[in-house]
Amino acid sequence: MATYFKRGKTWSTKVRWYDDDGKRHSKSKSGFSTKVLAKQWAVDQESKLNKGVQIAKEISLVDYYNNWVNTYKKDKLSAITLDRYKYTGEALKDFFHDDKIKSITRVKYQEFINQYGSTHAPTTVKKVNSIIRACVKSAILDDYLYKD
């Protein structure tokens, strides 16, 4: 069930549901310029729920990265390139451990890049950054993040 409310000049909405165990969950979003846009978002979320899609997604960056590599990259890359993706995953695990993908800020990511750059060549850092950015863009499309 969705609720809509106005906060200042923008509209917000909250979708609530119960999982199979009877546990209550909710997901909210704000910043809609009109109530119609808020309703459209809520209807889309409820539609996903009806199709069995989990909309309250919590996953660590490392887990998402590994799933992303296995799903989208593993069969399409050469062995050498796949090794680079593997080393990137190891670097993410060493720095971020089990941090949730939503909890990683620009500052924390920049700290990772700075630390990684202190022991690797600039070209390597650019390649690693490119790989991670592609993963983050995929996370946005999968609704784990709203922006990069």
Image (cartoon, rainbow, N blue to C red):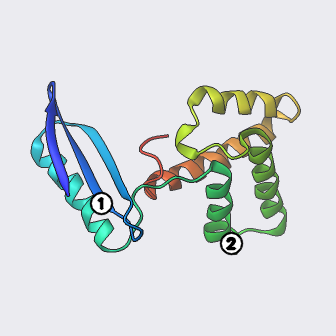
Left or right: 28 in relation to 138 = left
Q: CA distance from mark 2 to mark 1?
A: 38 Å
Q: Residue at x 42, y 55 (%)?
A: 56
Residue furthest out toward the right? 119
Q: Position of residue 58 (x, y in %)?
A: 52, 52
Q: Amino acid at mark 1?
A: Trp
Mark number displayed over residue 17: 1
Residue assigned mark 2? 76
- Rendered-image quadrant of the N terminus: bottom left
Q: Residue at x 79, y 58 (%)?
A: 86
- The vertical placement of 101 against 85, above or below, is above
- The vertical placement of 37 against 141, above or below, is above
Most foreground residue, 145 or 83: 145
Q: For mark 1, does the 10 Å Cα neighbourhood hold few (<14), some (14 to 19), or many (20 or more) residues? A: some
Q: Position of residue 44 (x, y in %)?
A: 25, 60
Left or right: 36 in relation to 115 = left
Left or right: 144 in relation to 120 = left
Tag 1's secondary structure? strand
Q: Residue at x 80, y 50 (%)?
A: 90
Q: Position of residue 76 (x, y in %)?
A: 68, 72
Most foreground residue, 104 or 73: 104
Most foreground residue, 26 or 67: 26
Mark number displayed over residue 114: none
Q: Amino acid at mark 2?
A: Lys
Q: Quadrant of residue 4?
A: top left
What is the tally of numbered marks visible in this picture? 2
- The vertical placement of 113 against 82, above or below, is above
Q: Residue at x 57, y 30 (%)?
A: 106
Q: Quadrant of residue 78?
A: bottom right
